[in-house]
Image (spheres, helix red, strand yellow):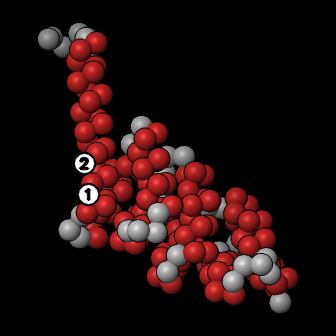
């Protein structure tokens, strides 16, 4: 085709492109779950975080919700932390609040700390009330409440300090 001519995509070509996208998403998912190194898993997460397909986000949320693969959960948290440090935008980042709070509360110690760090991608206004309620919930085990307090300590917002003082 010549310069300035618009590309025409037939419906069969569009289906192939769509199938290719789904295949790539499946490859990224398998890499996240079974990757040979943390760096490879994080690259898969990075690709899924920037993927506009809602299924990519759904896969990440499912992995976060499952306690079966700590390495994959850790890769998601570390990639979210890296995106915060590098100031990269995460598609639909709000969808990660509840799963990260769950990992924070119920994860192993290392997973909980990573979830606390990953929560830094959010403004305190987005998560402060939820953290505060969890921190003072006497029905939660002490270990879960301590994980939440750790997350509050990591927050750079002055209101997190006020929340911590209120807990005392």
Q: Residue at x 26, y 57 (%)?
A: 31
Disc ID at residue 31:
1
Q: Position of residue 96 (x, y in %)?
A: 56, 56
Q: Is residue 71 visible from the viewing direction of this image?
A: yes
Q: Is residue 14 left or right of residue 134?
A: left
Say which residue label 2 marks: 27
Q: Say which mark, if any, is on residue 53.
A: none
Q: Are marks 2 and 1 in contact (CB under 8 Å)?
A: yes
Q: CA distance from mark 2 to mark 1?
A: 6 Å
What residue is rendered at 47% in x and 47% in y? 58
Q: Is residue 153 visible?
A: no
The quadrant in which residue 77 appears is bottom left
Disc 2 element: helix
Q: Residues within 10 Å of mark 2 (few under 14, many from 20)?
A: few
Residue 149 percent coordinates (x, y): 68, 82
Q: Residues within 10 Å of mark 1 (few under 14, many from 20)?
A: some
Name above or below for residue 149 compared with residue 102.
below
The N terminus lies in quadrant? top left
Q: Is residue 144 above or below residue 80?
A: below
Q: Secondary structure at mark 1?
A: helix
Q: Is residue 151 left or right of residue 113?
A: right
Q: Is residue 162 left or right of residue 67?
A: right
């Amino acid at each position: 085709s010549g310069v300035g001519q618009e590309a025409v995509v037939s419906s069969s070509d569009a289906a192939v492109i769509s199938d290719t996208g789904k295949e790539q998403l499946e490859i990224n998912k398998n890499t996240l779950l079974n990757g040979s190194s943390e760096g490879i898993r994080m690259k898969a997460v990075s690709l899924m975080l920037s993927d506009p397909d809602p299924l990519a986000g759904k896969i990440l949320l499912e992995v976060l919700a499952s306690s079966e693969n700590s390495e994959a959960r850790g890769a998601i948290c570390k990639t979210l932390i890296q995106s915060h440090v590098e100031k990269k935008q995460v598609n639909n980042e709000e969808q990660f609040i509840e799963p990260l709070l769950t990992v924070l509360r119920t994860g192993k110690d290392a997973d909980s700390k990573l979830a606390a760090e990953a929560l830094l991608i959010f403004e305190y206004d987005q998560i402060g009330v939820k953290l505060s309620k969890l921190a003072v919930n006497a029905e939660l085990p002490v270990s879960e409440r301590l994980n939440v307090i750790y997350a509050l300590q990591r927050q750079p917002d002055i209101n997190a300090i006020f929340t911590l003082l209120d807990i005392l």
